Image (tube, helix red, strand yellow):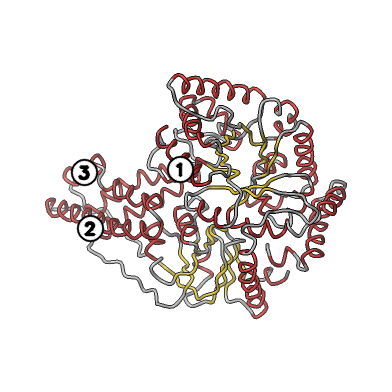
Amino acid sequence: MTELKKANVYRGIPAAPGIRIAEAFLFKKDIERVVEEDILDVDKALENFNEALVKSKDELSKVFSLAVDKLGEKRAALFEAQIMILDDPILIKTIVDRIIDEKKNSEFIVNSEFLKYQNLMSMSEEPYMKERSHDIEDIKNRIIRNIRKKKWKSRITEEEIILVSNSLTPADTVLFSRLKVTGYVTNFGGLTSHAAIVARSLNVPAVVGLHEATENINNGDRLIIDGFNGIVVVNPDDEQLEFYQRKLKKLSQADIELAKLKDLPAITLDGKKIDILANLDMSEELELIIQNGGEGVGLMRTEQIFQEYDSFPSEEEQTTVYSNYAQKLYPLPLTIRAFDIGGDKVLPVDVREPNPMLGWRGIRFLLDNRSLFKSQVRAVLKASIHKNIKFMIPMVASFKEVKLTRVLFDECKNELTNEGVNFDNHMELGIMIEVPSAALMIKDLADEVDFFSIGTNDLIQYMLAVDRGNDIVSNQYQEFHPAIIRTLYFIISEAKKYETKVTLCGEMAADYIALPLLVGLGLDSISVSGSVIPHAKQIIRALNYKEISELVAVCLKYKTEKEIHDALDKFYFDKFGESSKEFYSN
């Protein structure tokens, strides 16, 4: 596929899906350079600072109102939190006292105080905390700009553009939503950045983390942004334009055809039924899941849902959220995963670990923090009165962890019974299979749980000793590695042998070329993002289970990743008349 191997193709992180073709607009904020200066009129400096605070709060209030309209109250709460920082009495008093005591210009004091928080967050090993340092910087720059009584002026035209910037604050992203911004490209940022989250909420493609986007792209350059695969093409040639215009046309045609499948089951040509569930990361996704014909939620990432909150949710707040989702989905199932905290997700405590992905995370963290874990278990049980909730434990590595979880579960049930609270006493309890030790203990674990859910994202990186977030070794992260395919076969076969239900909820389930293999391995259900549901259903309905079982038998004998990948790609091309490499991935 030569179109995407040319020098004008740049790759970053796919932060929000979609494909757009438009002119580039380089957005550069004036950098407020601050120098230390002595002042004579302290009263005037204090007056300027206080006026700047009022002006900054007024600006953020307007952004908050716009965000509520565009994103809903939960996502907009971010800007409310920024306003609260400007009302922090300790921070404000510290700045005021320093201006008086040191007799230095207010811009210097503001910059100095906010830098303390920025540096603390920037030094964190957690991606989420690093991203929050940019939010603090945005508030700081807003105050300094208003101290200097500068006005921000947008030079964006009324034409459709793809905005290119060093980084984007949440406020930038929301304000640009009023204009004809059809995509975002940034040097910095990740999947956890608020700008990425807002872009996904607004359904605007985004590619972040290109590092040198602003150096390689000029104002007016024609761009293709591919938010599915993290690709940006600068001044595409005719071959590249034709390639992406073909993809856009097919995506448009596919949307029309896929809409017809909404109420049809995902069943193979010879009668094998596959349940297509959905992964739920953001509250806004629930409507899309239902709209696309999802058969329930196979993975509710609670740690992601509650990132929308200013503080860690109470038992009552959790109960309300879980009950709301269960009611909206009823009678479809809602599988709630316990807080998967740690690793690449921020901990609610200040802990520095040399290797967080192998450290205090998942069930390890929860069992060491029983009060936090119990509040979630109690909330889930209290929300289970409609009998359509399941609960799932992440990062299980041993039989002991499951037994201890069972003990805690029984403890919570007894407490609620004594309190006279109704709950589903037969609520199913499952575990994630994402650690190799758990994969090898299916027989033993099946005695203690009601279902398994394979988390391929972590399972692959732990089995192959590859950090999936490390660019240097990313090519070694191979979902079609023979060891991965054979392990999946073992897990599914063992689970069926001991009559335990098994599903798969990793990114592999959303890879269209992998779907025939996964169905052929014997999975009864998959869990994917809501947007993938129609495509997955279309593929499954075109498969013959006997035929793909034979494909699996062949793949299980191969010794290299390339052999398996080539066999699956050939199968896909023969079945659907196009290479998966050409249309669905790059």
Question: Quick check: marks 1 and 2 in contact, CB under 8 Å?
Answer: no
| Residue 541 percent location from the top left of the image | 73, 58
The mark tally for this picture is 3
Could you tell which of marks 3 and 1 lies nearer the N-terminus? 3
Question: Image quarter for residue 265?
Answer: bottom right
Q: Nearer the viewer, residue 536 or 418?
A: 418
**Which residue is under mark 2?**
55
**Which residue is under mark 1?**
324
For the point 62% across and 50% down, the residue is 528
Between marks 3 and 1, how big is the CA–CA gap? 48 Å
Residue type, numbered disc 1: Asn
The outermost residue toward the bottom is 238
Between marks 3 and 2, how big is the CA–CA gap? 21 Å
> In the rendered view, does 525 fall on the left or right side of 101?
right
> In the rendered view, does 270 fall on the left or right side of 244?
right
**Which residue is under mark 3?**
98
Between marks 1 and 2, how big is the CA–CA gap? 38 Å
